[in-house]
Amino acid sequence: MIHMTEATLMTEASPVAAKPHLPDAQTVTAVRHWTDRLFSFRVTRPKSLRFRSGEFVMIGLLDDKGKPLLRAYSIASPAWDEELEFYSIKVPDGPLTSRLQHIQPGDEIILRPKPVGTLVHDALLPGKRLWFLATGTGIAPFASLMREPETYEKYDQVIMMHTCREVAELEYGRQLVESLKDDPLIGELVGDKLIYYPTTTREPFHHMGRVTDNLSSGKVFADLGLPKMNPAEDRAMVCGSLAFNIDVKAILEGFGLREGANSDPKEFVVEKAFVGDGV
Ligand SMILES: Cc1cc2nc3c(=O)[nH]c(=O)nc-3n(C[C@H](O)[C@H](O)[C@H](O)COP(=O)(O)OP(=O)(O)OC[C@H]3O[C@@H](n4cnc5c(N)ncnc54)[C@H](O)[C@@H]3O)c2cc1C
Ligand SMILES: NC(=O)c1ccc[n+]([C@@H]2O[C@H](COP(=O)([O-])OP(=O)(O)OC[C@H]3O[C@@H](n4cnc5c(N)ncnc54)[C@H](OP(=O)(O)O)[C@@H]3O)[C@@H](O)[C@H]2O)c1
């Protein structure tokens, strides 16, 4: 298998050559913990991996029996980045993340290089404004798309609405948006096109409330001085819990937008940030 060859080469060149080989192995290059429930990390990128910003892959570790334990993860870095970035929850008893949260630079993870997903530019018809609507780790695909030049080439304005329970849970997204202004590669393209609208629901913050409430009450449009969402101008990508996705979909349809797909581009697309209702 071609990826076994890559994995072998990677391991031979890496300082952790003494560790057991993983199938489709990639080496962790950086880890950052944001809260006791959230962390991000970067890994080497397989030379053969091509993906569209916004897609997800399967990543994981070997379980106690030596079998790959894999979960879907949005690639949080853009398609042009030479490494791959991921933004992850830590589920205390989660089969994967109870262990993945302990990775260190130099460790290996498994990465199946078969990217897929609906949160891609190809799944939307051309428009004027693009809305990214996310809760929690659902910001991960948008961390990729906010760094993707095509995002700014295709739209006049890009609005990132991200809602978490607490302020600290917004920090990964906040720092990313802040860094884009001075980014040597895409800072100029981003210009003042990117509008960041973070809110919390369970801790006081300058903007509060669920994405759904801020859309249906019209508060976000009033706050940003934008017209109400409409199918002629607005496009949206949605990523959160199942309940969030269902509620947002109903609101977007109420504005006259229709759900699209890779094979049938329309005005909005949806993807689950995780499967399950809670931990
Ligand atoms: C298309 C897709 C993309 C995904 N992208 C990401 C990503 O970029 N980052 C990420 O952290 N997770 C992502 N997930 C979720 C991921 O696949 C795993 O569920 C997660 O890593 C936890 O794995 P686990 O084995 O520890 O627990 P699991 O057994 O997988 O999950 C246990 C429970 O934890 C809760 N949970 C799982 N993931 C999350 C989450 N992200 N936020 C809040 N609660 C959660 C759910 O209630 C779930 O039932 C994605 C899932 C899908 C379907
Ligand atoms: N975040 C934490 O501090 C924390 C700590 C320990 C355990 N957990 C557990 O981890 C799991 C995931 O937590 P999470 O905070 O990552 O995700 P979450 O429960 O989906 O909440 C993330 C954000 O989405 C909002 N939201 C939830 N459902 C929505 C809907 N249908 N429409 C619009 N907005 C919606 C929430 O608002 P509301 O606040 O109004 O619900 C919150 O601001 C939960 O089961 C939780 O019990 C979370």
Image (cartoon, helix red, strand yellow):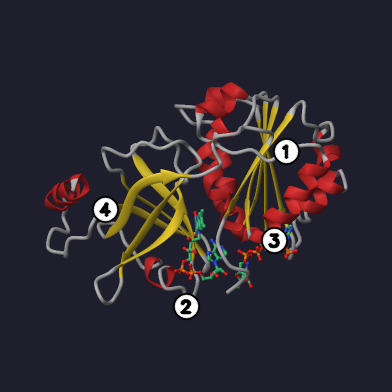
Determine which residue is flagged by label 3.
Answer: 243
Dividing the picture into quadrants, the one containing residue 129 is top right
Please state if 178 lies on the left or on the right of 213 as rendered: left
Residue type beneath disc 4: Thr
Q: Nearer the viewer, mark 3 or mark 1?
A: 1
Residue type beneath disc 2: Asp
Determine which residue is flagged by label 1.
Answer: 258
Among the two numbered marks 3 and 1 on one chain, the one whose residue lies closer to the N terminus: 3
Please state if 5 lies on the left or on the right of 213 as rendered: left
Determine which residue is flagged by label 4.
Answer: 27
Secondary structure of residue under mark 3? helix
Q: CA distance from mark 3 to mark 4?
A: 35 Å
Residue type beneath disc 1: Arg
Determine which residue is flagged by label 2.
Answer: 93
Secondary structure of residue under mark 4? strand
Rendered residue at 55%/23% (across/down): 189
Please state if 111 lies on the left or on the right of 182 as rendered: left
Query: Mark 3 and 4 residues: CB-CB less than 8 Å, in contact?
Result: no
